[in-house]
Image (spheres, helix red, strand yellow):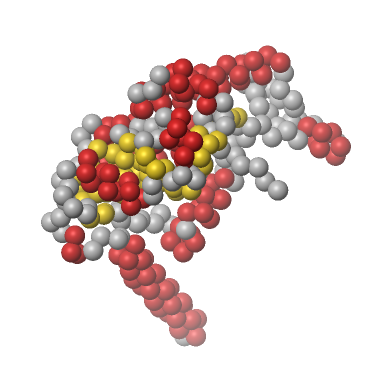
Amino acid sequence: MKKRSTFLAIVATLLIVGAFAAAGLALVRRASSPMPRLMVGRDKVGVVPIEGIIGLDVESDKIIEQLEAFKDNPSVKAVVVRISSPGGSVGPSQEIYDKILEVSEEKHVVASLADVAASGGYYVAAAADKIVANPGTITGSIGVIAEFPNFAQLLDKIGVKQAVVKSGEFKDIGSPVRDLTEKEKQLMQGLIDNVYDQFVMAIVEGREMERDAILPYADGRVFSGEQALAYGFVDDLGGLEAAVKMAGELGGIEGEPAVLYPERRFDSFVDMFFGQQVDGLLKRAQLPSFHLSYLFVPPTH
């Protein structure tokens, strides 16, 4: 009888905790949507935030879903992508870029560069019809980086060796237990050069700039929003409000446009209670030892 009572108490506790969690999740989701009821029926500018490292903190499929929803929403006349990102993985950056290009065929898209919109952060911005940056925004960093951790000397000191059986000469390229060979360095440089050229061509096509006008600044350097304006990489200076106003004008909205954000969705309780940063840390732990990135890596002290 005592065991049964204990079991029933545990079940009841779990049901209560589950009910509170579900209710809390529903409330947070409702509170996270900034769309007030007064906006119903008004023409709007949709704002899609892109915050954090693309491919880690920012999942391309979520951004694509949000852009698609605004494209299909008849009350949304234009879209602003608000970018606060040092870049990230090449593939997801390209996916977001392609989707912005697709949306811009039907509705005007303005990129608003926040504190940092560098490397892949600028890559996705280049697909927009117009780019607005703060004077002090850190942007640029046009380039590709691949990093290879190397523990060979440490393993030698502690007497650990690794036997490798492979199907081809380059199958274990980037292995952390040995140095790259000269042939591997040449192979990787060719890969980096190809993906770098894809970055430059994305700017050529998205910004309608001449390649020769891009290359002098496409060596990995960062520059301010004010410098970016002088170099031709952005169209105007200002914050999010200026970008929304520009998008509203491009979309034919008279007066001050209403602003619509995507509804915040949570994939897990970790995401719900601790945010994307913790979720991003968990994903970092699962990264392969080698990957290509359009990423600005600031120096650490």
For the question of whether residue 127 can be seen, the reply is yes
Is residue 10 toward the left or the right of residue 149 in the image? left
Q: How far across and down, in percent of the image, does residue 117 sit? A: 47, 41
Residue in the picture at 70% in, 48% down:
301
Q: Quadrant of residue 236?
A: top left
Is residue 250 toward the left or the right of residue 299 in the image? left
Q: Is residue 160 above or below residue 254?
A: above
Q: Quadrant of residue 108?
A: top left
Residue in the picture at 48% in, 81% down:
6
Q: How far across and down, in percent of the image, does residue 157 sit? A: 86, 37
For the question of whether residue 167 can be seen, the reply is no
Q: How far across and down, in percent of the image, does residue 116 sit? A: 49, 44
Nearer-the-camera pick, 120 or 157: 120
Q: How far across and down, in percent of the image, does residue 110 sit? A: 31, 40
Nearer-the-camera pick, 87 or 183: 87
Which residue lies most toward the bottom here?
Answer: 2
Nearer-the-camera pick, 254 or 183: 254
Residue in the picture at 67% in, 46% down:
300
Nearer-the-camera pick, 207 or 172: 207
